Amino acid sequence: MMARALMSSWMLHVQLAAAAVHQGTMSMWSQTHDTLVAYKSEGSACKYADRLMGGLNSVTAQTPYITSKNYCAVNRGLFGNGEICGRCYRLTYKGGHEQGLGSPGSDVVQIVDSGSWATFDCHMTAFHKITNYDTGFFPITYEEVACDTSPEGPVAGVLQYDYYFTKMVFSNLRYPVKEAELTIGGKKHEMKLIGGWWSAWTGPITGKTSFQITEENGFVVNFPNCFHGEWTNRKTGDACYTHGTGRSGKLLVNASLTEGVEKVLSLEPVEKNETQRPQLRGANSSVLFP
């Protein structure tokens, strides 16, 4: 009975959230090969395509929306501390531009950056689909929807690391990450969200490594046996999946002193991780769906 009540409450919450439609504005960004998501190779606020991870070839930049250029930045008010990273919205233009520009359209986009003047600042590909125009500010409505994902499934990518501190990016999820936890050698480490990426301070530690994240809709996703099973094996650009083949970034210190950074040269298959199906848990941690 308790599980049924929790499930009913959760479904009602999801239905109410899905029904929320908001008013906003949308503008566009100049069309470059890496606009917004990796502008000037800095990976944007959400860091999905950071240069150190491989830019647009990064494992965390392979969502259906990033590869098809259906993505946007949002204004600072919506961005918050990065909780919105990876969230998907349906943006709809119904007409009504004050100068009569464009024509009605709609598209689902993913959030990858902050700093927009309008509510949304979108790649030209998405902007044109929604407005059938190529410049200006347009009145739109927006509502949150579940994201489509690529076949590889959820991915945890190493953004940066040192002896004590590690930055991670989680990608290819249905909803943004609400909570994240790192386990090394049986010891749990709570992770903190900092402007779009997640951090963990571990100190000198070794052991079998896994991650567990909770999406904002309550689904729990597990990443078992990461980095060949050992925390000290992690490198910038490495990835851990819930299933399928993991990938490891080969690193080389760039010879150019003007860059002076580690650069991801290639990605190669490594060992296959165990598969664990995501679980939906209630407030009392009981599993609602096995």
Image (cartoon, rainbow, N blue to C red):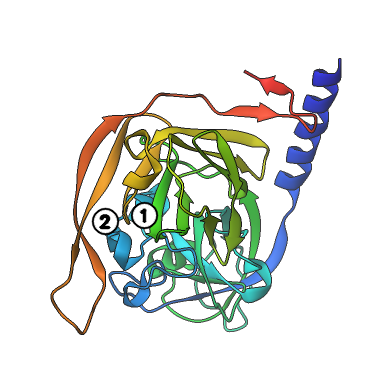
Which of 118 and 51 lies nearest the eye of the viewer? Answer: 51
Q: Position of residue 146 (x, y in %)?
A: 58, 43
- Residue at 57 percent across and 53 percent down: it is 87
Q: Position of residue 135 (x, y in %)?
A: 45, 80
Relative to residue 235, is residue 213 drawn left or right?
right
Circle 1/circle 2 CB separation < 8 Å: yes
Q: Position of residue 277 (x, y in %)?
A: 51, 24
Which of 72 and 167 lies nearest the eye of the viewer? Answer: 167
- The crowding category of the residue bearing disc 1, from other C-alpha atoms within 10 Å (few below 14, some 14 to 19, many at least 20), is many
Q: Let me know if residue 106 appears in the view.
A: no
Which of 130 and 153 lies nearest the eye of the viewer? Answer: 153
Extreme residue in the front direction? 204
Q: Quadrant of residue 236?
A: bottom left
- Residue at 54 percent across and 62 percent down: it is 196
Q: Is residue 4 above or below residue 87?
A: above
Q: Position of residue 281 (x, y in %)?
A: 70, 29
- Residue at 72 percent across and 61 percent down: it is 22
- The quadrant in which the C terminus is found is top right
Residue 61's tag is 1
- Residue at 46 percent across and 57 percent down: it is 166
Alpha carbon distance from label 1 to label 2: 7 Å
Q: Which residue is mark 2?
A: 57
